[in-house]
Amino acid sequence: MPQVGTGFIAFNLKNGPFSQKDNPDALMLRTAAAHAIDHRGIHEAVFNNQGQVAEQFYSESSPWHAKDVVSWPQYDLDKAKALRKRRRTATPSC
């Protein structure tokens, strides 16, 4: 019988580099970090390929699963690096 369980990664949005109050480019930095997360690699290394990678909060085993919905950006290191580089060049040096 399938079981429903979800592991997730969250950003601290109150303080630090991902916080809009501490960093005006926080959204771009969060997007870059999200593109740098290899969900399949984590699934293989941490969960030993057991279960499924849920491409949204609920897995396919859940009655609340929405078909054809992906709630996180695709793993793309080049895009993540480009966003970080764009952020660095957009910030004036002090």
Image (tube, helix red, strand yellow):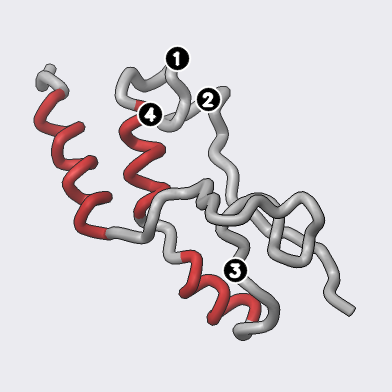
Eye-nearest disc, 4 or 2: 4
Mark 2 → mark 1, Cα distance in angstroms: 7 Å
Q: How crowded is mark 3: few (under 14 residues within 10 Å), some or many (20 or more)?
A: some
Mark 3 or 4, nearer chain start: 4
Report which residue position mark 1 lands on: 21
Mark 1 or 3, nearer chain start: 1
Residue lying at 36% horizontally and 52% vertically, measured from the top left: 35
Q: Could you tell me if the residues under marks 2 and 1 are in contact, i.e. CB atoms within 8 Å?
A: yes
Per the rendering, the mark at residue 15 is: 2
Split into 4 quadrants, where in the image is the C terminus?
top left
Report which residue position mark 3 lands on: 53
Towards the viewer: 75 or 59? 59
Q: Residues within 10 Å of mark 1 (few under 14, many from 20)?
A: few
Q: Which three-letter amino acid code belongs to the residue tagged 4?
A: Leu
Q: In this view, does 26 lie to the left or right of 49?
A: left
Mark 4 → mark 2, Cα distance in angstroms: 13 Å
Q: Examine the image and state in which quarter residue 88 appears.
A: top left
Asked if 31 appears above or below 2 in the picture, the reply is above
Q: Which three-letter amino acid code belongs to the residue tagged 3?
A: Val
Mark 2 or 3, nearer chain start: 2
Q: Examine the image and state in which quarter residue 85 appears.
A: top left
Report which residue position mark 4 lands on: 27
User: In terms of secondary structure, where does tag 2 sit?
Assistant: loop
Mark 2 or 1, nearer chain start: 2
Mark 3 → mark 4, Cα distance in angstroms: 25 Å
Mark 4 or 1, nearer chain start: 1
